[in-house]
Image: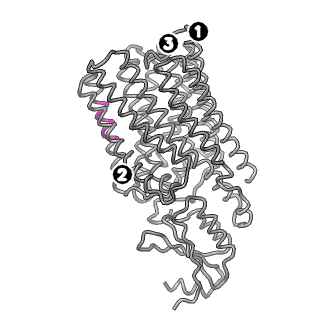
Amino acid sequence: MRPGSGLNFEYLPSWSIPFGFFSMAPLWGIVAGLLVSAAGVGVVFGDGFPWASRWQSTLIAGVHCLVLGVVAQTMIGALYQVLPVLGGRLIGGGLTGGRTVMWLLNLGLLCLVGGLTTSIGLFWVACLTFLPVSLLIFSISALRAAKPESQWSGSLLAVRCSLLSLVFVLLLGALQVSGYSAMLWPAYALDRHLTDIHLLWGVGGWIGLLVMGVSYQVVPMFHVTPALAAQRQKIYPLLIMASLLLTSVVWWLFPDSMLATWARWLNVFAFLGYVGELARALKQRKRKLEDASVKAWWTGIGSYLGFIVVLAARDAGLMWLWPLEWVTHLELAAGGMLIFGTILAVVLGMQLKILPFLSYLHMQRACGSDFSKIKSLPSTRDILPEIFSLGLVKLHWLNLSLIILMIFYFELAILAGLGMLAEFGLLAFSTHRVLRLLKRHI
Amino acid sequence: MTIATRIELDVSALAPPEPLDRALDALAVLNRGEYLAFLHYREPFPLYQTAAEGGFRHRVLERDDGKFEIRFWYADDDAVTAEFESL
């Protein structure tokens, strides 16, 4: 650890741990695309309305493919690389530990999707084994590594809060899977208020805080922006944890009340403060070059604002300003803006920088002190050409539009699913290309 | 009085890994009797090990303008070493 820097580059994990997760993540985007397309085909042939409510199993399966398969998997891979830099400790378990977490996560998710789409009981039992074991091994090992050597940084604090949220999300998720499999008390486990709290902590706590913690480092570094003041970096995660706790208590004790609505808005505004800081930093970039990753960050920011508008319209609907069907549509549109428009966009933005930089870093380490060998390495632009990155961001824009439209025009689900296949197919191809280059140079 | 010749490299507006690239270019042509003053808003940690293995020493200074100034010179360049050790 360099005194006063708060960063430590002495410990780097094996490249195959983060890249293992990065390679698997796009495949789940492809599965989500297939589910969406299949639902669209079902609509055309008169086989029901897949998005009639947020409780339909196809929708839940698709959302988990995206949030657990793509987002969580990418961020877990990134944490294996980032946490040692922030805290000066490798996540325990080494290569075997990393691979165990990855395979159990993917098997567990496969069983979850299998259970949701087929209702076969064995899938639920297997899911209840694989997913908790994977995520508990990861969260406990990562929590042990997420401790500062000297003083807390905003990044480390946000990551630690995020990992604690993951444990809570996992417990609530496992309880609900038990409900589906009738292993516990279904009526209790499938209480929709509990599902709302699971969603709140999953999106706001685990993913939201993790994105925040990592962004404190990657935005100033990759986009050459001023860093957020150290004190403010620490305030946001604490504020958000407090608002998540308060909201959960209110939702549990006073569900469907006006107080519950206000509690939700408390979280929305807590994140809005951070989003405002992020936008200000991106506006102050030192070199305003065209950059696909920056476009992805702006997409996330714009979608978050869109999410707020749609959520406000939905809440106005709850006050009987318009029909219940509209309220359901607005609820789903808000979810689409938040999950696909905001979270997936910023994770994509990070990936577009992290993938080429990490591979370059590992290649450079493998060259030792041979300057000429280092100079012969491909540049980050060669490792992940900007044309691929821009293509991914543009496909993301198209798919976000199609996802919002398909909520109102169900048939468009076929196109939205195909668009997702194209986007995540291109991401899988780009990741594989980076991995091939990396293997060639180490 | 300064004996060593200063070669300045300001990479504070560049994103990684460009600063590393530029530093390696500069170190490759650095002569004895010269030192590279590398200016950036963050410390180039991945560079330290590579530079050390390449036979360079470094010293980190924090400037009033918020930038770090990292000075690299040949480890066997006794004159420059003596000058910087006296700082």
Main structural element of the magenta stretch: helix, strand or loop? helix
**What are the residue bounds of the magenta stretch?**
A240-250
| Depth check, front residue: B25 or A200 | B25
- Residues at marks 1 and 3 on the same chain: yes
Q: What is the chain letter for disc 2? A: A
Q: Could you tell me the amino acid type at mark 1? A: Phe
Q: Which residue is mark 1?
A: A45
| Depth check, front residue: B19 or A9 | B19
Position of B27 relative to A158 (above/below): below
Position of A64 relative to A275 (above/below): above
- Residues at marks 3 and 2 on the same chain: yes
Expressed as whole percent of the image width and height from the top left, the position of residue B70 reads 53, 73
Label 1 to label 2, Cα distance in Å? Answer: 53 Å
**Going 49% across and 32% down the picture, which residue do you hit?**
A340
Q: Is residue A247 magenta?
A: yes
Horizontally, residue A34 falls left or right of residue A342, namely right
Looking at the rendered structure, the secondary structure element under dot 2 is helix
Way the structure is coloured: one colour
Q: What is the chain letter for disc 1? A: A
Which circle's residue, 1 or 2, is located before the other in the chain? 1
**Going 58% across and 9% down the picture, which residue do you hit?**
A45
Query: Mark 2 and mark 1 in contact (Cβ < 8 Å)?
Result: no
**Going 49% across and 12% down the picture, which residue do you hit?**
A49
Q: Which mark is residue A245?
A: none
Q: Which mark is residue A49?
A: 3
Q: What is the chain letter for disc 3? A: A
Expressed as whole percent of the image width and height from the top left, the position of residue A292 reads 56, 46
Q: Which mark is residue A234?
A: 2
